[in-house]
Amino acid sequence: MPSTFVKAGSPKPLPARALSGLRFETLRRSRCRDGERRPMNRFKPTIEDVARVAGVSRATASRVINNAPGASDLLRTRVHAAVAELGYQPNENARALASGRQRAVDVIAVTYGPGIGWLGTHPYFSRVLAGMMPVLEGVNAQLRLHAVGHETAAEAIDEIAAGTTLGAVLADITPALASRFYSRCRRTVSMVPTASSVPAMEADNIGGAYAAVTQLHQLGRRRIAAIHGPALNPCAIDRRTGYLQAVRKLGLMEVSADGDFHREGGYHAARQLLERHPAIDAMFIACDLMAAGAIQAITASGRRVPDDVSIIGFDDSIAAVCTNPPLTTMRLPVEDMAVAATRLLLEGSPPPGHRQRFPVDLVVRDSTRAFTAAARAAHPSASEG
Protein backbone atom coordinates (compact mmCIF):
# COMPACT_ATOMS: atom_id res chain seq x y z
CA MET A 1 0.00 0.00 0.00
CA PRO A 2 2.12 2.95 -1.25
CA SER A 3 2.11 6.16 0.77
CA THR A 4 3.52 9.60 0.03
CA PHE A 5 4.37 12.00 2.80
CA VAL A 6 4.02 15.79 2.74
CA LYS A 7 4.45 18.23 5.61
CA ALA A 8 1.13 19.24 6.99
CA GLY A 9 -0.37 20.73 10.15
CA SER A 10 -1.92 20.59 13.60
CA PRO A 11 -5.66 20.57 14.17
CA LYS A 12 -7.79 22.98 16.11
CA PRO A 13 -9.52 21.78 19.30
CA LEU A 14 -12.43 19.42 19.07
CA PRO A 15 -15.76 21.27 18.77
CA ALA A 16 -18.01 20.97 21.82
CA ARG A 17 -21.59 21.60 22.83
CA ALA A 18 -22.67 23.29 26.04
CA LEU A 19 -23.73 20.96 28.82
CA SER A 20 -26.56 22.44 30.83
CA GLY A 21 -26.96 21.79 34.55
CA LEU A 22 -23.28 21.34 35.43
CA ARG A 23 -21.60 23.73 37.82
CA PHE A 24 -17.93 24.38 37.26
CA GLU A 25 -17.17 27.08 39.85
CA THR A 26 -15.35 24.86 42.33
CA LEU A 27 -13.39 23.08 39.62
CA ARG A 28 -12.34 26.26 37.90
CA ARG A 29 -10.29 27.23 40.93
CA SER A 30 -7.15 25.78 42.41
CA ARG A 31 -5.71 26.41 45.89
CA CYS A 32 -2.33 28.10 46.22
CA ARG A 33 0.14 27.38 49.02
CA ASP A 34 -1.05 30.39 51.02
CA GLY A 35 -4.61 29.09 50.94
CA GLU A 36 -5.84 31.73 48.52
CA ARG A 37 -8.20 30.36 45.84
CA ARG A 38 -7.22 31.37 42.32
CA PRO A 39 -9.14 30.90 39.07
CA MET A 40 -7.94 27.87 37.14
CA ASN A 41 -8.25 29.69 33.83
CA ARG A 42 -4.87 31.31 34.56
CA PHE A 43 -3.35 27.89 34.03
CA LYS A 44 -3.48 25.55 31.09
CA PRO A 45 -6.17 22.92 31.79
CA THR A 46 -5.18 19.27 31.65
CA ILE A 47 -7.03 16.17 30.63
CA GLU A 48 -7.47 15.42 34.34
CA ASP A 49 -9.35 18.72 34.68
CA VAL A 50 -11.58 17.75 31.77
CA ALA A 51 -12.29 14.37 33.38
CA ARG A 52 -13.22 15.96 36.74
CA VAL A 53 -15.52 18.55 35.14
CA ALA A 54 -17.23 15.92 33.01
CA GLY A 55 -17.50 13.50 35.91
CA VAL A 56 -15.75 10.69 34.06
CA SER A 57 -12.50 8.80 34.38
CA ARG A 58 -9.33 10.04 32.75
CA ALA A 59 -9.43 7.04 30.42
CA THR A 60 -12.94 7.93 29.24
CA ALA A 61 -11.96 11.55 28.68
CA SER A 62 -8.96 10.40 26.67
CA ARG A 63 -11.09 8.08 24.54
CA VAL A 64 -13.52 10.87 23.71
CA ILE A 65 -10.83 13.45 22.96
CA ASN A 66 -8.99 10.97 20.74
CA ASN A 67 -12.23 9.91 19.03
CA ALA A 68 -11.72 6.31 20.10
CA PRO A 69 -14.56 3.81 20.66
CA GLY A 70 -15.70 2.80 24.14
CA ALA A 71 -17.72 5.84 25.31
CA SER A 72 -21.47 6.42 25.09
CA ASP A 73 -23.01 9.43 23.37
CA LEU A 74 -23.96 10.88 26.76
CA LEU A 75 -20.40 10.67 28.06
CA ARG A 76 -19.07 12.14 24.82
CA THR A 77 -21.44 15.08 25.21
CA ARG A 78 -20.23 15.69 28.76
CA VAL A 79 -16.57 15.49 27.82
CA HIS A 80 -17.00 17.80 24.82
CA ALA A 81 -18.83 20.29 27.03
CA ALA A 82 -16.01 20.17 29.57
CA VAL A 83 -13.45 20.74 26.81
CA ALA A 84 -15.38 23.81 25.69
CA GLU A 85 -15.89 25.12 29.24
CA LEU A 86 -12.24 24.83 30.18
CA GLY A 87 -10.80 25.79 26.80
CA TYR A 88 -8.80 22.58 26.82
CA GLN A 89 -6.50 22.07 23.83
CA PRO A 90 -4.78 18.71 23.44
CA ASN A 91 -1.02 18.82 23.01
CA GLU A 92 -0.85 17.17 19.62
CA ASN A 93 2.92 16.69 19.65
CA ALA A 94 2.72 14.98 23.03
CA ARG A 95 -0.12 12.78 21.81
CA ALA A 96 1.91 11.77 18.78
CA LEU A 97 4.94 10.93 20.91
CA ALA A 98 2.84 9.00 23.42
CA SER A 99 1.11 6.94 20.76
CA GLY A 100 4.18 6.49 18.60
CA ARG A 101 2.13 7.59 15.58
CA GLN A 102 2.88 10.52 13.29
CA ARG A 103 -0.08 12.84 12.93
CA ALA A 104 -1.34 12.79 9.36
CA VAL A 105 -4.29 13.26 7.05
CA ASP A 106 -4.90 10.10 5.05
CA VAL A 107 -6.23 10.28 1.47
CA ILE A 108 -7.85 7.07 0.25
CA ALA A 109 -8.63 6.06 -3.34
CA VAL A 110 -9.98 2.68 -4.41
CA THR A 111 -8.81 1.49 -7.82
CA TYR A 112 -11.09 -0.60 -10.03
CA GLY A 113 -8.72 -1.99 -12.65
CA PRO A 114 -5.36 -3.77 -12.77
CA GLY A 115 -2.50 -1.78 -11.30
CA ILE A 116 -2.39 1.64 -9.67
CA GLY A 117 0.01 3.43 -12.00
CA TRP A 118 -2.78 5.53 -13.49
CA LEU A 119 -3.47 7.08 -10.08
CA GLY A 120 -0.41 9.31 -10.27
CA THR A 121 -1.30 10.63 -13.73
CA HIS A 122 -5.05 11.17 -13.32
CA PRO A 123 -5.80 14.92 -12.98
CA TYR A 124 -8.50 14.38 -10.35
CA PHE A 125 -6.13 13.08 -7.69
CA SER A 126 -3.50 15.74 -8.31
CA ARG A 127 -6.25 18.35 -7.89
CA VAL A 128 -7.31 16.80 -4.57
CA LEU A 129 -3.74 17.04 -3.28
CA ALA A 130 -3.31 20.55 -4.70
CA GLY A 131 -6.33 21.66 -2.68
CA MET A 132 -5.23 20.00 0.55
CA MET A 133 -1.56 20.91 0.70
CA PRO A 134 -1.88 24.73 1.06
CA VAL A 135 -4.24 24.21 4.02
CA LEU A 136 -1.71 21.95 5.71
CA GLU A 137 1.36 23.97 4.76
CA GLY A 138 3.60 24.74 7.68
CA VAL A 139 1.78 22.45 10.09
CA ASN A 140 3.56 19.58 11.79
CA ALA A 141 1.89 16.55 10.18
CA GLN A 142 2.00 14.36 7.12
CA LEU A 143 -0.26 13.70 4.16
CA ARG A 144 -0.51 10.01 3.26
CA LEU A 145 -1.99 8.80 -0.02
CA HIS A 146 -3.32 5.24 -0.11
CA ALA A 147 -4.18 3.48 -3.38
CA VAL A 148 -6.31 0.46 -2.53
CA GLY A 149 -7.30 -2.32 -4.93
CA HIS A 150 -11.05 -2.97 -4.94
CA GLU A 151 -10.63 -6.71 -4.35
CA THR A 152 -8.84 -6.20 -1.04
CA ALA A 153 -10.32 -2.82 -0.12
CA ALA A 154 -12.26 -3.93 2.99
CA GLU A 155 -9.21 -5.29 4.77
CA ALA A 156 -7.03 -2.39 3.64
CA ILE A 157 -9.34 0.34 4.88
CA ASP A 158 -9.67 -1.38 8.25
CA GLU A 159 -5.90 -1.18 8.59
CA ILE A 160 -5.83 2.47 7.51
CA ALA A 161 -8.64 3.40 9.92
CA ALA A 162 -6.72 1.88 12.82
CA GLY A 163 -3.79 4.18 12.13
CA THR A 164 -5.53 7.48 11.43
CA THR A 165 -4.75 10.52 13.56
CA LEU A 166 -6.05 13.79 12.09
CA GLY A 167 -8.54 11.94 9.92
CA ALA A 168 -9.13 10.79 6.37
CA VAL A 169 -10.32 12.25 3.07
CA LEU A 170 -12.10 9.61 0.97
CA ALA A 171 -11.13 10.71 -2.54
CA ASP A 172 -12.72 7.81 -4.41
CA ILE A 173 -14.54 5.04 -2.54
CA THR A 174 -17.91 3.31 -2.73
CA PRO A 175 -20.67 4.17 -0.21
CA ALA A 176 -20.46 0.70 1.35
CA LEU A 177 -16.72 0.97 1.93
CA ALA A 178 -17.12 4.56 3.16
CA SER A 179 -19.64 3.38 5.76
CA ARG A 180 -17.27 0.65 6.87
CA PHE A 181 -14.43 3.13 7.23
CA TYR A 182 -16.62 5.68 9.04
CA SER A 183 -17.70 3.08 11.60
CA ARG A 184 -14.01 2.74 12.50
CA CYS A 185 -12.91 6.37 12.17
CA ARG A 186 -15.26 9.31 12.77
CA ARG A 187 -12.80 11.90 11.53
CA THR A 188 -13.76 11.25 7.93
CA VAL A 189 -14.89 13.33 4.95
CA SER A 190 -15.86 11.93 1.55
CA MET A 191 -15.15 13.77 -1.70
CA VAL A 192 -17.59 11.63 -3.69
CA PRO A 193 -21.28 10.66 -3.32
CA THR A 194 -21.54 8.44 -0.27
CA ALA A 195 -23.71 6.91 2.45
CA SER A 196 -26.05 9.30 4.24
CA SER A 197 -24.23 9.08 7.58
CA VAL A 198 -20.76 9.84 6.20
CA PRO A 199 -19.73 13.55 6.17
CA ALA A 200 -19.13 14.68 2.61
CA MET A 201 -18.34 17.42 0.13
CA GLU A 202 -21.21 17.09 -2.32
CA ALA A 203 -20.95 18.22 -5.97
CA ASP A 204 -24.00 18.17 -8.22
CA ASN A 205 -22.90 15.38 -10.57
CA ILE A 206 -26.46 14.53 -11.58
CA GLY A 207 -27.36 18.15 -12.30
CA GLY A 208 -24.10 18.69 -14.17
CA ALA A 209 -24.71 15.76 -16.51
CA TYR A 210 -28.30 16.86 -17.05
CA ALA A 211 -27.12 20.39 -17.90
CA ALA A 212 -24.55 19.05 -20.38
CA VAL A 213 -27.13 17.05 -22.34
CA THR A 214 -29.56 19.97 -22.25
CA GLN A 215 -26.86 22.26 -23.65
CA LEU A 216 -26.18 19.87 -26.53
CA HIS A 217 -29.91 19.67 -27.24
CA GLN A 218 -30.15 23.48 -27.31
CA LEU A 219 -27.39 23.49 -29.93
CA GLY A 220 -29.65 21.44 -32.21
CA ARG A 221 -28.10 18.05 -31.46
CA ARG A 222 -30.60 15.19 -31.42
CA ARG A 223 -28.50 12.01 -31.43
CA ILE A 224 -26.66 12.50 -28.15
CA ALA A 225 -24.61 9.53 -27.00
CA ALA A 226 -22.85 9.09 -23.66
CA ILE A 227 -19.64 7.47 -22.52
CA HIS A 228 -19.99 6.51 -18.86
CA GLY A 229 -17.39 5.85 -16.19
CA PRO A 230 -16.75 2.73 -14.06
CA ALA A 231 -19.91 0.98 -12.88
CA LEU A 232 -18.86 1.11 -9.20
CA ASN A 233 -17.59 4.70 -9.15
CA PRO A 234 -20.01 6.95 -7.21
CA CYS A 235 -19.45 10.01 -9.43
CA ALA A 236 -19.85 7.94 -12.58
CA ILE A 237 -23.12 6.52 -11.25
CA ASP A 238 -24.54 10.00 -10.64
CA ARG A 239 -23.41 11.29 -14.04
CA ARG A 240 -25.03 8.30 -15.73
CA THR A 241 -28.24 9.11 -13.84
CA GLY A 242 -28.14 12.73 -14.99
CA TYR A 243 -27.70 11.68 -18.63
CA LEU A 244 -30.60 9.24 -18.45
CA GLN A 245 -32.88 11.81 -16.82
CA ALA A 246 -32.07 14.34 -19.54
CA VAL A 247 -32.60 12.10 -22.59
CA ARG A 248 -35.89 10.85 -21.17
CA LYS A 249 -37.04 14.40 -20.43
CA LEU A 250 -36.08 15.54 -23.95
CA GLY A 251 -37.56 12.49 -25.68
CA LEU A 252 -34.22 11.32 -27.09
CA MET A 253 -32.94 7.82 -27.63
CA GLU A 254 -30.45 6.52 -25.10
CA VAL A 255 -27.17 5.57 -26.78
CA SER A 256 -24.22 4.83 -24.53
CA ALA A 257 -21.05 2.84 -23.90
CA ASP A 258 -18.95 2.28 -20.81
CA GLY A 259 -15.46 3.62 -20.31
CA ASP A 260 -13.07 3.61 -17.37
CA PHE A 261 -12.13 7.27 -16.74
CA HIS A 262 -8.98 6.79 -18.87
CA ARG A 263 -8.10 8.19 -22.29
CA GLU A 264 -7.91 4.72 -23.82
CA GLY A 265 -11.35 3.85 -22.51
CA GLY A 266 -12.83 6.95 -24.14
CA TYR A 267 -11.14 6.16 -27.44
CA HIS A 268 -12.44 2.59 -27.64
CA ALA A 269 -15.94 3.52 -26.42
CA ALA A 270 -16.24 6.30 -29.03
CA ARG A 271 -15.15 3.97 -31.84
CA GLN A 272 -17.72 1.43 -30.72
CA LEU A 273 -20.49 4.02 -30.62
CA LEU A 274 -19.67 5.44 -34.07
CA GLU A 275 -19.59 1.97 -35.62
CA ARG A 276 -22.97 1.04 -34.16
CA HIS A 277 -24.65 4.45 -34.50
CA PRO A 278 -22.96 6.46 -37.28
CA ALA A 279 -25.60 9.23 -37.08
CA ILE A 280 -24.44 10.36 -33.62
CA ASP A 281 -24.06 14.14 -33.66
CA ALA A 282 -23.03 14.75 -30.04
CA MET A 283 -21.50 13.01 -27.04
CA PHE A 284 -21.64 13.64 -23.32
CA ILE A 285 -18.54 12.06 -21.80
CA ALA A 286 -18.30 11.60 -18.04
CA CYS A 287 -14.60 12.48 -17.71
CA ASP A 288 -12.28 14.85 -19.59
CA LEU A 289 -9.62 12.17 -20.02
CA MET A 290 -12.12 9.91 -21.77
CA ALA A 291 -13.27 12.88 -23.85
CA ALA A 292 -9.68 13.40 -25.05
CA GLY A 293 -9.62 9.82 -26.29
CA ALA A 294 -13.06 10.19 -27.87
CA ILE A 295 -11.93 13.25 -29.86
CA GLN A 296 -9.06 11.18 -31.23
CA ALA A 297 -11.44 8.39 -32.26
CA ILE A 298 -13.91 10.79 -33.88
CA THR A 299 -11.17 12.53 -35.84
CA ALA A 300 -9.72 9.21 -36.94
CA SER A 301 -13.13 8.24 -38.36
CA GLY A 302 -13.07 11.25 -40.69
CA ARG A 303 -15.56 13.28 -38.66
CA ARG A 304 -14.96 16.79 -37.39
CA VAL A 305 -15.28 18.09 -33.83
CA PRO A 306 -17.41 20.13 -33.23
CA ASP A 307 -19.13 20.34 -36.66
CA ASP A 308 -20.10 16.69 -37.09
CA VAL A 309 -19.94 15.63 -33.44
CA SER A 310 -20.03 18.10 -30.56
CA ILE A 311 -18.59 16.96 -27.23
CA ILE A 312 -19.05 18.00 -23.62
CA GLY A 313 -16.81 16.44 -20.96
CA PHE A 314 -16.83 16.57 -17.16
CA ASP A 315 -14.27 17.82 -14.59
CA ASP A 316 -12.57 20.82 -16.26
CA SER A 317 -9.19 19.25 -15.59
CA ILE A 318 -5.92 20.05 -17.39
CA ALA A 319 -6.98 17.55 -20.06
CA ALA A 320 -9.79 19.88 -21.15
CA VAL A 321 -7.39 22.56 -22.40
CA CYS A 322 -4.94 20.08 -23.94
CA THR A 323 -7.38 18.54 -26.44
CA ASN A 324 -7.74 19.71 -30.04
CA PRO A 325 -10.12 21.47 -30.10
CA PRO A 326 -10.19 22.59 -26.45
CA LEU A 327 -12.99 20.82 -24.60
CA THR A 328 -16.31 22.25 -23.48
CA THR A 329 -16.87 20.66 -20.08
CA MET A 330 -18.69 20.74 -16.76
CA ARG A 331 -16.41 22.18 -14.09
CA LEU A 332 -16.09 20.10 -10.91
CA PRO A 333 -14.53 22.37 -8.22
CA VAL A 334 -12.17 19.68 -6.89
CA GLU A 335 -9.63 22.02 -5.29
CA ASP A 336 -12.33 23.96 -3.43
CA MET A 337 -13.87 20.72 -2.19
CA ALA A 338 -10.48 19.45 -1.00
CA VAL A 339 -9.79 22.70 0.86
CA ALA A 340 -13.15 22.50 2.63
CA ALA A 341 -12.70 18.81 3.48
CA THR A 342 -9.27 19.40 5.01
CA ARG A 343 -10.41 22.37 7.08
CA LEU A 344 -13.35 20.38 8.36
CA LEU A 345 -11.04 17.58 9.54
CA LEU A 346 -8.72 20.03 11.29
CA GLU A 347 -11.69 21.32 13.27
CA GLY A 348 -12.29 17.86 14.74
CA SER A 349 -14.86 15.15 14.07
CA PRO A 350 -17.46 16.37 11.53
CA PRO A 351 -21.10 15.79 12.52
CA PRO A 352 -22.65 12.62 11.06
CA GLY A 353 -24.32 13.30 7.73
CA HIS A 354 -22.65 16.71 7.32
CA ARG A 355 -22.94 18.03 3.75
CA GLN A 356 -21.26 20.99 2.09
CA ARG A 357 -22.61 21.45 -1.44
CA PHE A 358 -20.77 22.69 -4.52
CA PRO A 359 -22.19 23.69 -7.91
CA VAL A 360 -21.06 22.21 -11.24
CA ASP A 361 -20.81 24.84 -13.99
CA LEU A 362 -20.63 24.74 -17.78
CA VAL A 363 -17.34 25.96 -19.28
CA VAL A 364 -17.74 26.60 -23.01
CA ARG A 365 -14.76 26.04 -25.31
CA ASP A 366 -14.42 24.89 -28.92
CA SER A 367 -15.72 21.31 -28.88
CA THR A 368 -19.37 22.40 -29.18
CA ARG A 369 -21.18 24.26 -31.96
CA ALA A 370 -24.77 24.82 -33.05
CA PHE A 371 -26.04 22.19 -35.50
CA THR A 372 -27.68 24.08 -38.34
CA ALA A 373 -29.90 22.63 -41.05
CA ALA A 374 -27.04 22.93 -43.53
CA ALA A 375 -24.70 21.14 -41.17
CA ARG A 376 -27.26 18.39 -40.64
CA ALA A 377 -27.60 17.88 -44.39
CA ALA A 378 -23.82 17.62 -44.70
CA HIS A 379 -23.48 15.21 -41.78
CA PRO A 380 -21.56 12.03 -42.81
CA SER A 381 -24.54 9.87 -41.82
CA ALA A 382 -27.45 12.17 -42.66
CA SER A 383 -29.22 9.31 -44.42
CA GLU A 384 -29.60 7.24 -41.23
CA GLY A 385 -33.06 7.49 -39.71
Image (spheres, helix red, strand yellow):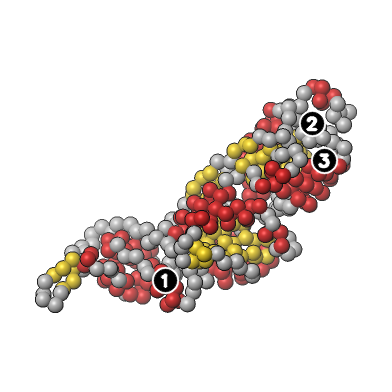
Sooner in the amino-acid sequence: mark 2 or mark 1: 1
- Work out whether 110 lies above or below 323: below
Crowd around label 2: few <14 · some 14–19 · many ≥20 (10 Å): some
Give the mark count.
3
Residue at 64% from the left image edge and 52% from the top image edge = 124
Q: Nearer the viewer, residue 252 or 350?
A: 350
Determine which residue is flagged by label 3: 298
Residue 56 placement, left or right of 121: left
Crowd around label 1: few <14 · some 14–19 · many ≥20 (10 Å): some
| Label 2 residue SS | loop
Q: Name which quarter of the figure residue 69 lies in.
A: bottom left
> Horizontal and vertical percent for residue 273?
82, 42
> Horizontal and vertical percent for residue 54?
28, 67
Residue at 70% from the left image edge and 47% from the top image edge = 319
Q: Name which quarter of the figure residue 121 lies in.
A: bottom right
> Horizontal and vertical percent for residue 373?
79, 22
Q: In this rendering, which labeled residue sits more in front, label 2 or label 1?
A: 1
Q: Amino acid at mark 1?
A: Asn
| Label 1 residue SS | helix
Q: Amino acid at mark 3?
A: Ile
Q: Label 2 vs label 1: CA separation?
A: 61 Å
Determine which residue is flagged by label 1: 93
Residue at 72% from the left image edge and 34% from the top image edge = 366
Residue 281 seen anywhere in this rendered image of the structure: no
Sooner in the amino-acid sequence: mark 3 or mark 2: 3
Q: Amino acid at mark 2?
A: Asp
Residue 150 seen anywhere in this rendered image of the structure: yes
Residue at 37% from the left image edge and 69% from the top image edge = 91
Residue 40 placement, left or right of 321: left
Determine which residue is flagged by label 2: 307
Position of the C terminus by quadrant = top right
- Tag 3–tag 2 contact (CB < 8 Å): no
